[in-house]
Image (cartoon, rainbow, N blue to C red):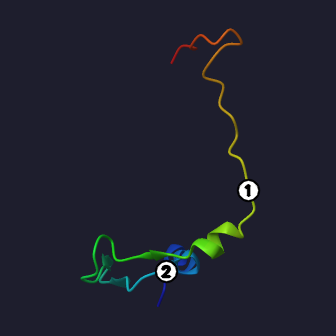
């Protein structure tokens, strides 16, 4: 059974991850054990994030 986020992850990465007893079980592959599906990712439309205004028009920083 794939959990929601893991099923979405399956679309864009090849892996052997499984959720067992509420934990993510990874295999012995190098690194995180995933292979990114670059062609599938490239087909996604570009969706820019909302721009946050951290600077004033003159380039100076706004207060935190």
Residue under the point 55% across and 76% down? 37
Circles 1 and 2: CB distance less than 8 Å? Answer: no
Badge 2: residue crowd in 10 Å (few <14, some 14–19, many ≥20): few
Image height of 54 relative to 10, above or below:
above
Q: CA distance from mark 1 to mark 2?
A: 25 Å
Question: Which label was assigned to residue 46?
Answer: 1
Nearer to us in this view, 24 or 22: 24
Q: Nearer the viewer, mark 1 or mark 2?
A: 1
Badge 1: residue crowd in 10 Å (few <14, some 14–19, many ≥20): few
* For residue 47, side relative to residue 18 (left or right): right
Nearer to us in this view, 36 or 18: 36
* For residue 23, side relative to residue 13 (left or right): left
Residue 46: image location, x then y, percent: 73, 56
Question: Which label was assigned to residue 62?
Answer: none
Residue under the point 45% across and 77% down? 35
Residue under the point 54% across and 77% down? 4
Image height of 14 relative to 50, above or below:
below
Secondary element type, mark 1: loop
Nearer to us in this view, 7 or 27: 27
Secondary element type, mark 2: loop
Name the N-terminal-most of marks 1 and 2: 2
- In the current view of this chain or complex, which residue is farthest to the front? 39
Residue 43: image location, x then y, percent: 72, 70
* For residue 24, side relative to residue 50 (left or right): left
- In the current view of this chain or complex, which residue is farthest to the left? 28
> What residue sits right under mark 2 in the picture?
3
Residue under the point 29% across and 70% down? 31
Tag count: 2
Residue 18: image location, x then y, percent: 37, 85
Image height of 46 relative to 26, above or below:
above
């Amino acid at each position: 059974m794939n959990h929601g986020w893991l099923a979405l992850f399956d679309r864009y990465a090849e892996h052997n991850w499984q959720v067992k007893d509420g934990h993510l079980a990874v295999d012995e592959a190098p690194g995180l054990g995933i292979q990114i599906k670059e062609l599938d990712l490239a087909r996604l439309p570009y969706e820019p994030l909302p721009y946050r205004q951290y600077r004033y028009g003159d380039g100076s920083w706004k207060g935190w």
